[in-house]
Image (cartoon, rainbow, N blue to C red):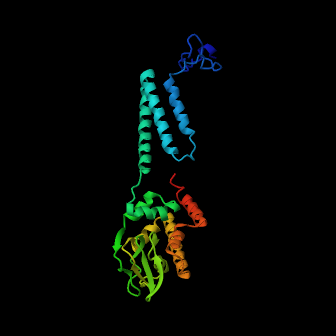
Amino acid sequence: MASPSDQPLLFYPTLPSFPSPTPGLEADSNVTLCQEWEQTHHLLFHLGNLSLLLGLVIPTTLGLHMILLRLLLMTGCGLFIAWATLYRCNMDVMVWNVVFLVVNFMHLFFLMYKRRPIKIDRELRSVYKRMFEPLHVRESLFQRLTGQFCTIQTLKKGQAYAAEDKTSVDERLSILLKGKMKVSYRGHFLHNIYTNAFIDSPEFRSTEMHRGEKFQVTIVAEENCKYLCWSRERLTYFLESDIFLNEVFRYLIGKDITNKLYSLNDPTLSDKAVKKMDRQPSLCSQLSMMQKNHQVQKDPR
């Protein structure tokens, strides 16, 4: 019988021992790694972190929240780049912060571009201020609405915008920019149309489901007039693609029709009273439009 000494020796590979993190101290799982804390970093390092902290604690309710956040992130990255380059000589920290700086700069540029001042034509400024701005329509959206498929046209005093039983209602929708128009039926005066009011809102609403009809009234310029005219077909297609703006138009047209009905029922209303009534949207309508605007525009961010 072989003795234990005759048994073949088994060789097990041994792992090399790692040097102790602190010279003269043996590695032990019960010994903490941080025996001595490093000295504090340079002031630039702490200022960079402070800048990042300020950017993260900016309240989202602030109007310029995203712009300030990007500015503070860029400031922090710039301080880290200076610290890593001048005092730490650390290429990794410098390169990564350069990347972060470029990314934040691109975001900041895009945010500033979106907030750039929109130039609305002087002739359309009054329409925007009186009709669309109170309903929180952004200037950029109004510019899209008026810049693609509408024209500004003129009528001299005495010229007809529409003739009863002759002019089709399917072609256009218009807002009076300047002057005054008279609406009549078979020679009988009905009411006037003033600036910043739709010219043919009743026809637009009543023929949404029935095309091919003619105007039932005659609309004639009482003064030299200028009006904003949309192609009805293209305007309808555009409004179908924008829920919020579609609701705005439904409200504005409904309000304009209501004002015209008031003028029909009370012919003693003075021109001044009609203009004042047309300028004042009801509180309920404003609250409803603000809620609709909040629901539709909540998704982008």
Q: What residue do we see at 41% from left, 73% from top?
A: 174
Q: Residue furthest bottom?
A: 186
Counting from the top left corner in percent of width and height, residue 289 is at 56, 63
Give the quarter of the image for residue 298.
Answer: bottom right
| Closer-to-camera residue (82/190) | 190
| Closer-to-camera residue (278/71) | 278
Eyeballing the image, is 286 above or below 50? below
| Residue 216 seen by the camera | no
Eyeballing the image, is 139 above or below 103? below
Give the quarter of the image for residue 142.
Answer: bottom left
Q: What residue do we see at 48% from left, 64% from top?
A: 130
Q: Residue furthest top?
A: 24
| Closer-to-camera residue (217/247) | 217
| Residue 137 seen by the camera | yes
Q: What residue do we see at 44% from left, 50% from top?
A: 115
Counting from the top left corner in percent of width and height, residue 268 is at 54, 80
Q: Is residue 291 left or right of residue 201?
A: right
Give the total number of marks visible in the rendering: 0
Point out the image quarter for the N terminus: top right
Counting from the top left corner in percent of width and height, residue 185 is at 45, 87
Give the quarter of the image for residue 54.
Answer: top right
| Closer-to-camera residue (97/248) | 248
Counting from the top left corner in percent of width and height, residue 148 is at 36, 64
Q: Is residue 176 left or right of residue 280?
A: left
Eyeballing the image, is 202 above or below 70? below
